Image (cartoon, helix red, strand yellow):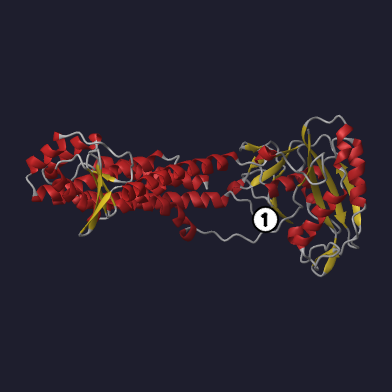
Amino acid sequence: MLTYIIQVVLFQALFLVIYDFAFSKETFFTKNRWYLIGTMILSFLLPLIKITTVKETITKEYLILLPEIILSPESVIEKQEWYQSIDYLDFVFWGGLLLFLTIFLIKIVQLINLVYKNNVIKKEGYSLVLIPKTTKAFSFFNFIFLGEKISDEKREKIIAHELVHINQKHSLDLLFFEILKIVMWFNPIVRIYQKRITLVHEFLSDEIVSKTANQGNYINNLLSEVFQVQEMSFVNQFYKNSLIKKRIVMMTKSRSKQSKQLKYLVLIPVLISMLFYTACSEKESISITPVLETQKIFTSLDKEPVETDRLSYMDFYMGDKLPNTKEYSIEELIEEEKEEFLAMTEKFKDNSTIKLKIFEGLNHRKVVALSLFIKKSELGKYERKQGDLVPMAELDVYPTFPGCSNGDKDCFTKSMISYVKENFDVSLADNLNLKKGRQRIFVKFKISKTGIIEDIKVRAPHPDLKSHAEQLAKNLPQMKPGMKDNETVNVGYVLPITFNIQ
């Protein structure tokens, strides 16, 4: 979503720069109006076009390991402090939206009050609202609001001006931008857009009215009296000091030559460039999404790898020196990569001379590299042999937790989470003098071909917690084993359990 918003704002800024430099000084007011509305809509649509135009086929993925189970020292089911669960960006966004929506609704109520509390005269095509003790002059949809202090002579020209706003539905434009200002309250480009189209509205009205009235008298009327201004950005105001000079300059300016309309053709290469940009950014985002595929073992990123029969989210690297590509920390991995890396770490944990590191591999796929290097002749021992654990993604039928339907992976996961939360006594951590903050336990086990829990190994921050986690795994009920190629197989798990020490 953040990427989409950034692209929208960038497109709006580019469209606005083009307008200011190429079109704002021309007298093609109607075209400029539709340019501003059209490019605003396009700025929201263009980043989405990549969804239908740029697609890559991705093999259906299966989760390999159980999700992290989070517990709390105070209770079996973790109930985090409320402030820990808040997404502060969402809080700020919705808070700002609510604030600006409230301000908008207050102004709408003010307009409604003006209608109901003052004298309303029904006219053909509009309603005239007379406001006492003021010289305000503005319109909103079919209502023209006029201060009673405005002279009859000036009223006629103001009404003619405001009728153009009404007939051309300018209030719809302003309301459209007002809604965008609420939704994208953090985006100053929308406000600039609204100011530009407000000025175009005035140019359109001035152009039509000055054709039916003496232009000099009309300009004098604009300058002869200081009107009070209604502080609402979504109403058409006859008088606004910041616009008077620009309106007069545009009225007295020579009409733009028709040939200058060719400048609008600049939009064609701009739109094509934007489409290429969104397409390329989408392709990149897809390419870096981890995909479950056959794991490759590299001795060099410049040479052909050794293929294995193991499905994995990351490849393996055993070269003479570490890759010179970007190195990642475990915090930078997505959940599937993280769990796979932790499983690899468990595999080598008994050898203190070996450490695993993560680097950028080919096609944005990460590789796990050994910091103590292994000879090429030893690569074969890392390929799966008869009796090895089979990753869940390769299974034809998943292990079945008692009470679940045969091979129901989701039920298995939910049952395992429920079992841990009901049986893991996190109160044991209260008096172990553990470091405050988040602590983790990793329970590794396998469901054998007979459905028995075997090979339990635990990594925990304290021996008491380790013993408790081992006992928890031993007490797991007998499962129905997983199957591959119509044969029962061993299936391994790494179960992360997280809890907070206050």
In the image, what residue type sits under mark 1? Leu
Res. 256 visible in picture: no
Give the quarter of the image for residue 243. top left
Near-viewer residue (270 or 256): 256
Q: Which residue is mark 1?
A: 292
Q: Is residue 404 left or right of residue 148?
A: right
Residue pictured at 18% horizontal, 49% vertical: 159
Q: Is residue 310 left or right of residue 100?
A: right
Res. 208 visible in picture: yes
Q: How many marks?
A: 1
| Residue at the limit of the structure toward the bottom, as seen here | 486
Q: Is label 1 in a helix, a strand or a loop? A: loop
Near-viewer residue (374 or 124): 124
Q: Position of residue 412 (x, y in %)?
A: 79, 60
Figure check: 489 above or below 434: below
Q: Position of residue 190 (x, y in %)?
A: 38, 43
Q: Position of residue 358 (x, y in %)?
A: 68, 40
Near-viewer residue (80 or 117): 117
Q: Position of residue 455 (x, y in %)?
A: 90, 50
